[in-house]
Each structure stands twice: as structure tokens, then as C-alpha cells.
Amino acid sequence: MNTEILPFSQDSVEKAAEILKNGGIVAIPTETVYGLAANALDETAVKSIFAAKGRPQDNPLIVHISSFDMIKPLTTEIPELAKRLAERFWAGPLTVIFNKTDIVPNATSGGLSTVAVRMPANDAARAVIEKCGFPLAAPSANLSGKPSPTTAQHVFEDMNGKIPLIIDGGECAVGVESTVICFVNDRIHILRPGGITAEMLSEYAEVEIDRAVEAAPKADDRVISPGMKYKHYSPKAEVFVVNKRAGDFVKFRDTRNSENAWFLSRGKYGEGFVDFGETAEIQAQRLFALLRKADENGVEKVYVEIPDKSGVGLAVYNRLIRAAGFKVVDE
Ligand code: TXA
Ligand code: MG
């Protein structure tokens, strides 16, 4: 199959909708990362997403909508708190788990009785959903286990020959996937941190963060969000989170063989360091692209100055620690 990359335009949106209406899959930009989209209500179409990504069948997909009304047929009830959060944070990088109705196929929900829903803030994504008239299931458009794609070129690297069309909407604004939440009693439970932060959510209810966000899941853990248990975001290079800041990180570099190694620094520490960015927002935008670039450059080891775990930094840390296979270096 020939994989076409077209810029976001009315033409490319129409072309994408045509493919999707016929049960096909298309890559679309969102404000977080690129998504691999299919009709969320068409079991066969959804199964072809799993095939293209090589994704485990029990890992459920997020269903993307373009207007609040589209959520009603998908869920048995919409809690009051969910309505308030949607009003404030949609369109945007927040995914909410609801109890699902029967029209959501098991392939989409990974066999769960719940469905994850979000309304992306990206114009191209919403235009495609609107044109289709049905919600789109869309996981990140990478091969399963690889760093998520934040440019059309990243999608092409992983999906060339497997899908007919990628809509190019430029670089993703946020750079890490959406925040995934569910409700536990009246608390907001964060399953995956993202662009909508714990601090932002805490204005609406008490927030708790799933222990799998920062720690490696134990074999006997009950995992609420299946995606958290898989190896993730991994480049070929070996990644290490280095628990040292600033001058100590600079000194750390001297203790390691720097041949074929990258040292991602949060400040401009000069020669021998790769700029990861000073703020968590910039680190989020750069993380996946840098991991892919390390592979392109034949880098074998990537050492990363530990991010702050506040704000979007928690999402950066969560992705990084998985890319690193939970390896944190202290000395
Ligand atoms: O920003 C995003 O959310 C991107 C863009 C494309 O929208 N999508 C994305 O999808 O990251 P994916 O499939 O790579 O990640 C979905 C995450 C997984 O960790 C999955 O386990 C979790 O959401 N999830 C989906 N449905 C769920 C459900 N019903 N209950 C619990 N977790 C769920
Ligand atoms: Mg993903």
C-alpha cells in the first residue's frame, strides 16, 4: 500500500473521511501526539488498528469526539463532575473513562465495560471527526512499544505501507498523550498524567494519582488502565533517568563513557549536552522526537537529567521512566 502524506486542508479531510467511512484507517494530528484513527463503532475497522500497530488486544482505545453531544450514545451515564470537567477542559488533552453502552464494540474497549472518551483540541482532528459523523478510536500512531509520533514524518517511519493516508498538521503542541482519568467515589483518579495536570484538576475535586504512574507495576498489581502494564515508548537506545540536577548532572557526565551516548540536559550546559529544554512544557514537546533522533544517530545510551514531577513534568517523568525500563541512576 502506498502511504500518502497530505497537509491539513478541506481536501485531505474529505479524503480521510471517505477512507474512514469505508472502514479504513488514517493517521491524524492531535494536540498531543498523532493518532491512528478508525470508526470507533466498527469492530472490524478497529481491529485493523491493532494489526497495524502490533498492539495487544486487551489494551483499550480512546474514543475521540468533536462535540459534546457525540458522547451520549457511548455512555450509560455522565457524572456531574465529568460534565464540569468537560466544560472546562474540552476540547483539550483530557480523557475521561465512562461506563459504556453496547454500541461500543469490545474491540474498542479492550473487553472492558468502560470506554475512554476525549475531544481533541486540534482543528484537523475535529474536522475529520465532524466530516465522518461518527466517533474515532485513535491510539498513538506509533508501532506498539515505540516512542509516540509528534510529527507526520514519525508516523511515516512506523506506518509506511500499512495505511493509505497521513494528514500532516505539523508538530504536536503538547507532545505527550492526554491525561487519562476515572472517578473513584468523588475523587479524580489519574491513570496517566498528561497536558491537563493534577494541579489543574484539583480545582474541581480531590485528585489521587495511580501508583503505576511513577512506579513499575508489580506482577500482582491490579491494573486499572491496561496500557500502563506494557513496555512503552522505547527507542533502540538504552535510556537512563539520572537523579541529578544541574552541576551534579554535568559532573555525572564525566563518570560515563560519552562515546555513542547522549546527555539530555535541562539547561544549556555547553558542549557534550543535548538540550532537553528548561520547562516541563518544552521537555514534553521534545521528548519523543529526541528518543527517535537518538536512534537515527546510532546513539546507544541516553542519559536524561531528571524532570520535575510537578505540572506537565509528571507526564514527562511517567513516559521517560517507561522508556528507561524504570532505570534510575543515583550515582
Ligand atoms: O493523547 C492521546 O490520548 C492520544 C491521541 C492520539 O489522542 N491517544 C493515545 O492513545 O494516547 P493510546 O491508545 O496510545 O493510549 C490510551 C491509553 C492506554 O493507556 C489505555 O490503556 C487507556 O488509555 N485506556 C483506554 N481505554 C481505557 C479504559 N476503558 N479504561 C482504562 N484505561 C483505558
Ligand atoms: Mg500509545
Image (cartoon, helix red, strand yellow):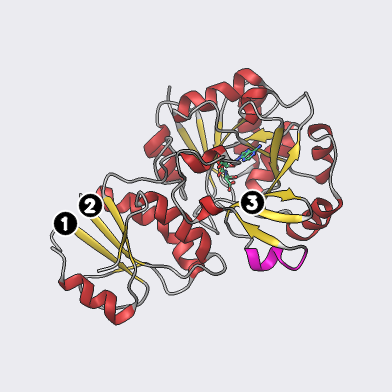
Residue most extreme to the top: 44
Ligand 2 within 8 Å of the CB at mark 2: no
Quarter assignment of residue 102: top right
- Residue on which disc 3 sits: 122
Amino acid at dot 3: Asn
Stretch of the chain drawn in magenta: 198-204
Residue 103 versus residue 324 in the image, above or below: above
Residue 280 versus residue 235 in the image, above or below: below
Q: Which residue is at 48% across, 56% downward?
A: 214
Q: What label sits on residue 287 in the rendered view?
A: none
Q: Which residue is at 65% across, 59% downward?
A: 208
Amino acid at dot 1: Asn
Q: Looking at the picture, how far across and down is residue 167, in whole percent?
A: 54, 40
Amino acid at dot 2: Asn
Q: What label sits on residue 297 in the rendered view?
A: 2
Q: Looking at the picture, how far across and down is residue 131, in whole percent?
A: 73, 35
Q: How far is mark 2 from mark 1, CA to CA?
A: 9 Å
Contact between labelled residues 1 and 2, with CB atoms less than 8 Å apart: no
- Secondary structure type for disc 3: loop
Residue most extreme to the bottom: 247
Q: How far is mark 3 from mark 2, CA to CA?
A: 31 Å
- Tag nearer the camera, 2 or 1: 1
Compare marks 2 and 1 and give the one earlier in the sequence.
Answer: 1
- Tag nearer the camera, 3 or 2: 2
- Secondary structure type for disc 2: loop
- Residue on which disc 1 sits: 260
Q: Looking at the picture, how far across and down is residue 189, in whole percent?
A: 67, 53
